Amino acid sequence: MAIFVPVGDRPANELPVDQKVASLRKILREMGSVVVGYSGGADSALLLKIAHDELGDKAVGAIAVSESYPRRERDSALALAKDLGIPVEVVETREIEREEYAANPANRCYYCKLELFSHLSRIARDRGIRWLAYGANHDDLGDYRPGQEAGREVGARAPLIEAGLTKAEIRHVSHEIGLPTWDKPAMACLSSRFPYGARITKELLARVEAAEDFLRADLGFREVRVRHHDTVARIEVGADEVDRMLSRDLRMQITTRLKELGYLHVAVDLEGFRSGSMNAVLTLAPERTNGH
């Protein structure tokens, strides 16, 4: 596996969108062959589609299946890849069996990505593919993303970052080329629903998944997170959906179902959905994040 070392800071994020897309295509052509970590989200779907456009069968998607990845998301991602005619390998990852992951430290994503990249590396070796790639975008540079450190260690590349594409631009380009993921809500792994330091188990992941499936599939909420706080489920939905969730009929349905799943208390976060809201604790003083 070759190692990619970025050379300086690129001003790519300041370019027009069409120039960024042209740059992305050029980057992928120069890579020659690539295994793309694919989740079915807006970022990885666009990266895989353009990689396949440029490289054909030398671009392969790889999707990880584990307890931390919602089955609904997996099925949707595989269906999209099939519709696009893009080959995707399904790999079973076992990050939950790693103690450093299950203990849920602040750098949990690092260990998850190490597990994922080990499988992507195997696929690359078996197929004679040179590069690994994943779908981080330029906006991710401003957030806490320990998984990117794992990517750097194994020499994986983030072509969307290299091309300077932001999330809004990725959605715009996806809409232009007809990808149905253009307006798909962001979906982090289920382990992101747990406060750092709270142990992650297969049973609790299944509980969170069932709660979110109920809110999405049965009640029609579009952007949903069920944050697990021991006996309390703290629900985040889009700001425009908070009022609907607080209606009496829905409050009763939601409370009843989530208590059936094992929660004693059900709360609605009045701020609505915030990506990475569990990271807020990382800005507190160290003594407040040490087991509290």
Image: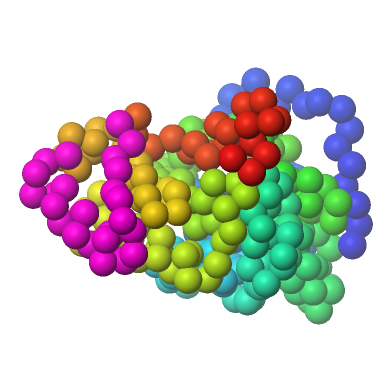
Please state the horizontal and vertical placement of residue 198, each as a whole percent of the image.
57, 53
Q: Nearer the viewer, residue 102 or 20?
A: 102
Q: Position of residue 152 (x, y in %)?
A: 82, 47
In the rendered image, which quarter is residue 68 located in? bottom right
Foreground residue among 92 and 75:
92
Q: Is residue 265 magenta?
A: yes
Q: Position of residue 247 (x, y in %)?
A: 11, 41
Would residue 76 be seen by someone viewing this image from the given angle?
Answer: no
Vertical order, 96 against 161 (above or below): below
Task: Please name the residue shown 59% across and 68% down the image.
Answer: 63
Residue 174, image x, y percentages? 47, 45
- For the residue pair 61 and 253, the one nearer the viewer reads as 253
Q: Nearer the viewer, residue 137 or 82?
A: 137
Residue 278 vertical position relative to residue 142 in the rendered view, above or below:
below
Which quadrant of the figure contains the C terminus? top right
Q: Is residue 256 left or right of residue 233?
A: left
Is 34 one of the magenta-colored residues?
Answer: no
Question: Which residues are drawn in magenta?
Answer: 246-270
Q: Is residue 167 left or right of residue 25?
A: left
- Above or below, 115 against 143 in this view is below
Q: Is residue 269 left or right of residue 27?
A: left
Q: Quadrant of the N terminus?
A: bottom right
Query: Residue shown at 45%/54% (left/top)?
Result: 230
Judge whether residue 199 can be spotted in this image.
yes
